[in-house]
Amino acid sequence: MINKSVKVRLYPNRKQKEQFQNNFGACRFVYNHILDRLKKLYQYYPGQYRLNIKLINTFLNQIKDENSFLKDVESTSLQQSSRDLYKSYMNFFKNPKTRFPRFHSKKKTRLSFRQTVTANLVQGKYFKLRKYGKIRYRTSKEYINLLNNSNVKINSITVSCDNGEYYAIVNIEIVNDVLFDFTGVSVGFDVNSNRNGWLVSSAGDKFRFDISHENQMIKYLNRQLSLKQKGSRSFNRLQRRLWKYYNKRTHKLYDYIHKLSKCIVEDFDTVVFEKNLGSIKVLIGGEQNSVFPLMEFIRLLEYKFGWYKPDAEGVVFVDPKYTSKTCNECGYIHNNLDVNTRNWICPECGSSLDRDINAAINILNRWDNGDCLVKV
Ligand SMILES: [Zn+2]
């Protein structure tokens, strides 16, 4: 669930403009009059007077009774105004850094009121506001699509006036993005150093990322930098260029894991990894200190499963022991398998095995067989 604000321009007619102005004034009136009562209460019971929303509502009703012009004003906006005051009053007690709420002045406070909305707020090119009827609005295509999306719940609308122009901020809740369909497919992934594909799937896919250009530039600039005098102008200029490439590389990698994780969640319902991912270092560009954001990638996968496929099994982990050394065909364990051997033939059954794909298949099989389950 995501909360978002959508800004639209409003085109009220003359009568509506008049009504809006009255509404702005009435909200300020209510706010200031309740605040006046609260201030008096606070003077009698300094530092310890806490109130509940019921008292605020009582105040609001009293003020409405005493001032008959408020009867003509849209009522939910007056209520929202008193709620805002209640919030900032309570904030004053909770947070010692907050000041006691202050009176709204005609000049300094932005002209605005907030309404709760009915289910049929959006009607084509018009908004149907409580009490004020249909008002034409305009906004971007993207926002229009959002407002008309059935997964979007509209909570409230804040109308404001700025230099004679009217705007509305629509507060929306995106209940759910488009969900992905189940594919019924599970996959195992083996994570390696970068050289032969940092991620290898049980289906035989090998994933690589290419940041060789950035790496080359970083290497080159570092070398140049070492030749300059520290603090000199050319040194500083080179350093800025170097930072730019570091940032570029980071940005590229995060962009990459965002896209890849979304594709994986779309294609598979279950994704199996080894449990020891925290200890695997996927180096980028062979540098000791620059490590691929592997755990961030896993976090993104888990997050996106929750978002796009909330009912899928998602990311799961199995025991990493012997996943590379076991033949996925017959289960023979090759104890003397060298770390650098990429391909081997099983002495037991004669299968020709790619080291990484074989490991990924073993990882998937472990989960399918229900062995060594580790659900995180
Ligand atoms: Zn075998």
Image: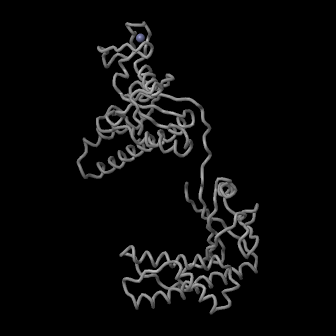
Which is more toward the observer, 277 or 169? 277
**Would you place residue 54 above or below residue 310 in this image?**
below
Which residue is farthest bottom? 66
- When asked about the image quadrant of residue 190, the answer is top left
**Number of numbered labels in the structure image:** 0
Quarter occupied by residue 253:
top left
For the N terminus, the quadrant is bottom right
Q: Residue at x 60, y 79 (%)?
A: 111
Horizontal placement of 151 versus 366: left or right?
Answer: right
Quarter of the image with the C terminus in it: top left
Snapshot colouring? one colour
In which quarter of the view is residue 165 placed? bottom right
Name the one closer to the observer, 160 or 178: 178
Ligand 1 sits in which quadrant?
A: top left
In this view, the residue in front, 5 or 221, is 5
Where is residue 317 shown, x and y percent of the image? 41, 33
How far from the left and from the top, in percent, is residue 192? 38, 28
Q: Residue 104: x, y in percent?
A: 52, 84
Query: Compared to 234, does 262 lie above or below?
Result: above
* Residue lying furthest left: 229
| As drawn, 121 above or below 30 | above
Q: Position of residue 169 (x, y in %)?
A: 61, 67
Nearest to the observer: residue 350 or residue 229: 350
Q: Residue at x 60, y 54 (%)?
A: 175
Q: Is residue 112 above or below residue 62?
A: above
Q: Residue at x 36, y 34 (%)?
A: 277
